[in-house]
Structure formats: structure tokens, C-alpha cells
Amino acid sequence: MSEGINAYDAVVELNDHTHWAFGTGFDDPLAGIDTSVPPGTDTAEQCLALGDDALIMSHRLAEWCTNAPELEDEVALANLALDLLGQARLLLSRAAQSRGEGETEDTLAYLRGEHEFRNVRLVELPRGDFAHEIARLLVFSTWRLGVFERLVDAPDPVLAAIAAKGVKELTYHREYAAAWTVRLGDGTDLSHRRMAAALEAVWPYVDELFDSGAGRDEFDAVIRQVLEAATLPIPNVSVAARVAGRAGRDGVHTEAMGYLLAEMQSVVRAHPGAAW
Amino acid sequence: MSEHRIAGVGPAGGSRGASGSIVSARDVAATVVDPELPMLTIAELGILRGVQEDGEHVTVEITPTYSGCPAMAAIRADVSARLHDAGFPDVCVRTVLYPPWTTDWITADGRRKLEEHGIAPPGKAGRAVPLLLGRRDTVPCPRCGSPNTVEMSRFGPTPCTALFRCTACAEPFEHVKAI
């Protein structure tokens, strides 16, 4: 590659390895890693669910580009989205390996239908105001950090390594969300009201997070610590209704999910096989 | 974006055979720089985990800084290109995820270079921290050394840096976050 190349050429050049975090056809993020899966583990299912959570949350966070209240927070939210997209790529690649049906991270992200996604409903909720995003991020990162801390000892060494890496990132995400929760909750009357309303809006989707795992006490303790500092009450609202007992992990989603996928998958579906 | 992609160690770098000297694959791989922090080589950044030479075949192990680090593909391509140019035709670049990279892997030389380039190096990373809620260590200004600095944004131009401003000399600067 010559030194005189301009930035646009570098981005669009085919077969170039330096394109950034969008598009299809990236190098396998698990390149060179032992692909064997220990027998008797449910790694494929776990990686798919946690990968879907990260992918959809990443998509919602990315929607804040050009919409955040300050440039610094726009950059911050985009960086959180990038971390989660990275986790999604590793987890979906691992899920694809484990399922052994010739899938890739791309086919899992772009070619599945709504009912095949296993993400919790919290992450697909439509973007609200900034307080709503902070409330969702506080709940999501606090919960996911606990899940990853336990997965560090997972029987699948690849999942364990992905979790060990993610713990460090999620610690930052939680810190960011907690700081903003305190700033808004312990701010003006208006910001306090809106932060309280935001927590009430996402709280019905907390219950579902603990369907398949421990950690509720630890989660509650962290949330209590943050909300006390933010002078906010713990929301007292009903749990979101399920469909015959089923929710996101069973592939039963809210209305927002179809619209989200329609946007996220539109280019791949309109131009099958295209790389960009 | 192009500066890190200038391929090859020129004749001065001593390609294999040309000068009669044998350059180890590790020495070659260690010269590749990080695209986001181009003052650091991947060895100084601590993401070069290992280089094994087995006859003509070279295996290089690298680890990502962040899960979503978009520079990994570029680094992988750079390592391959640099080794090819140095006379190693058969190169395999493997990803290693464990143990996870932390900023503690940045070498002393790497930290010094960051500071020389106006980027405050990270403190000790340690284990995952409990909620800080605003409490954190001070980051001295890399230009004037003053401890009176404020964080403007937890996230700077890249995920691994935060944006600070020095209230003594008024200069903004980046800080590589301890992670």
C-alpha cells in the first residue's frame, strides 16, 4: 500500500484488513484458537444467549451516535457499544463453532429471524431519553458483570477467557452508568424525576435476567448502593408480562425486536453475499 | 491510518540472508507498532505473547487489548507482512485470549514513550474494582507534572484512553486507563 493513499480508499479497499467495526467478512476473532468443545457443556447455548445480548445492546447504544447530550457521552456510548460488539463477535463465533453447523458470526447476526434470537428483552427496548439509556445500562452492566465473573470458571476454556476479558470492560461500563445515575438522580428536580421514571420503565425487565442463574442478591446490593447515592428509590413496579411463561431467552420478544432486526439486517438481506 | 502499514523492514533492518545476518522472527514481529498508539510497538504494549520459529514456519501469538479492538486485524496483517518481507514465507498469527491483557503488560519502555508523547501512562491495574462512584486516583499531567488534573471524558479517541485536562498548564491530554 502506498503512503499517498487517502482515508476513504483505505476504508473501501476490498480485501483490506483494516476496515473498521462495521460490515461483514472480518477475520475470525477466534483465529488460531483451539476449536474443540469440552463434551457435556451447554457452551453453544450460553454463548448464543450472551452473544445476542451483547449484539442487540450494542446496536441500541450505537443509535446514540449524533443523539447524545454531549460529544463526550456520544464517544463514551459508542465505545461501550464497540466493547459489546467485540464480545458479541467472540461469543457468536464460539457459538457457531460449538454448534458445528457451518454457521459463522455473520450468519448468526444477520441471517436469523426474530424468534431465533435469545437475547433478554431489556436490550431490545426502543431507545428512550438519555436517562432511560443510563438506567438500562446500569441494570445490564451490573447483571452481566456478575454473570461474567461467575463464567471465569466455566468448563469451556474459550468462554472462560472471553468472560475474563469482558469483566474488565463491564466494570468500566457499570462505573459510567452509575456515575450518570448519581449525577441525574442527585441533580435537579427535573433530572431526578426523569431518572426515577427511567428506572421504573426498565425495572419490569429485570426479573427475566435471573431466570437461569444466581446473582440476584449481589445485583440488588450494587443497585441499592448506586440508588442511595443518587437519592432514588428502588422501583416498585410489576414484572413485564410473558407469553405463556416465555420471554427473550425462549425467542419471544417485544414488538421492538422485529424493527431492530429489519434495520440491522437490511443490507445483508438486500444484497446477499455482499462484503462491506 | 496509512503510517503503520508501510510494509517491511528496509535493507537497514537486515532482511534474512541479504546481510548474512540472521534476524530472529521475534525481533521482526516486535517492531510492528500499534495503529492506535503508534509510538508503541506491540512488544512494548504487551500484546505480543510469543513467537515460535520451527524451520521455515513461524507462529506468532497476539492478544487483544479490548474485545472489540478494531486494530487487531490490522496488527495481524502487519505482523504477517513484516515477517514475509524479512524472509519468513510461512507465518501463522494466532489469537490468544487467556490470560487477558491488562495495562500492567505495558513495559517500562512503553510507559516512558507514552509519557514522552504527552499521554499519561496507566497506573497499576489490579483486580476488578468495586464501584468507585467518582473516587479515583489522581493522574499527573504528562506535560508539566501537576497533580491538578480533571477527567473530561472517561472515553477518549480510542476505548483504551480517557480524556483529561490539566488545570495548572491548561493542556488537554490523553490517559491510558488502567484496566
Image: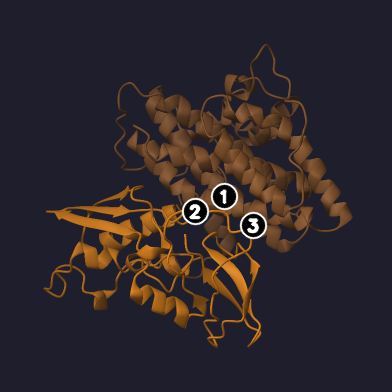
Chain colours: A brown, B orange
Residues behind callouts 3 and 2 on a single chain: no
Residues behind callouts 2 and 1 on a single chain: no
Which amino acid, by three-letter code, is at mark 1?
Answer: Leu
Q: Position of residue B76 (x, y in %)?
A: 37, 54
Kindly report which numbered mark, 2 or 1, lies closer to the viewer in this rendering.
1
Mark 3 vs mark 2, CA separation in Å: 16 Å
Mark 1: secondary structure: helix
Q: Is residue A126 visible?
A: no
User: A1 or B98: which is nearer to us?
Assistant: B98
Mark 3: secondary structure: helix
> Which residue in the rendered view is the most extreme toward the right?
A190
Q: Residues within 10 Å of mark 1 (few under 14, many from 20)?
A: many
Q: Which mark is residue B70?
A: 2
Q: Residue at position x 53%, y 53% from top?
A: B130
Q: Position of residue B86 (x, y in %)?
A: 24, 65
Q: Position of residue B155 (x, y in %)?
A: 60, 62
| Chain of the residue on which disc 1 is drawn | A
Which amino acid, by three-letter code, is at mark 3?
Answer: Ala
Mark 1 vs mark 3, CA separation in Å: 10 Å
Mark 2: secondary structure: loop
Mark 1 and mark 2 in contact (Cβ < 8 Å)?
Answer: yes
- Above or below for A101 versus A30: above
Kindly report which numbered mark, 3 or 2, lies closer to the viewer in this rendering.
3
Q: Which mark is residue A76?
A: 3
Pointer 1 residue: A82
Q: Is residue B36 visible?
A: yes
Residues behind callouts 1 and 3 on a single chain: yes
Q: Position of residue B70 (x, y in %)?
A: 49, 53
A177 to the left or right of A172:
right
Which amino acid, by three-letter code, is at mark 2?
Answer: Pro
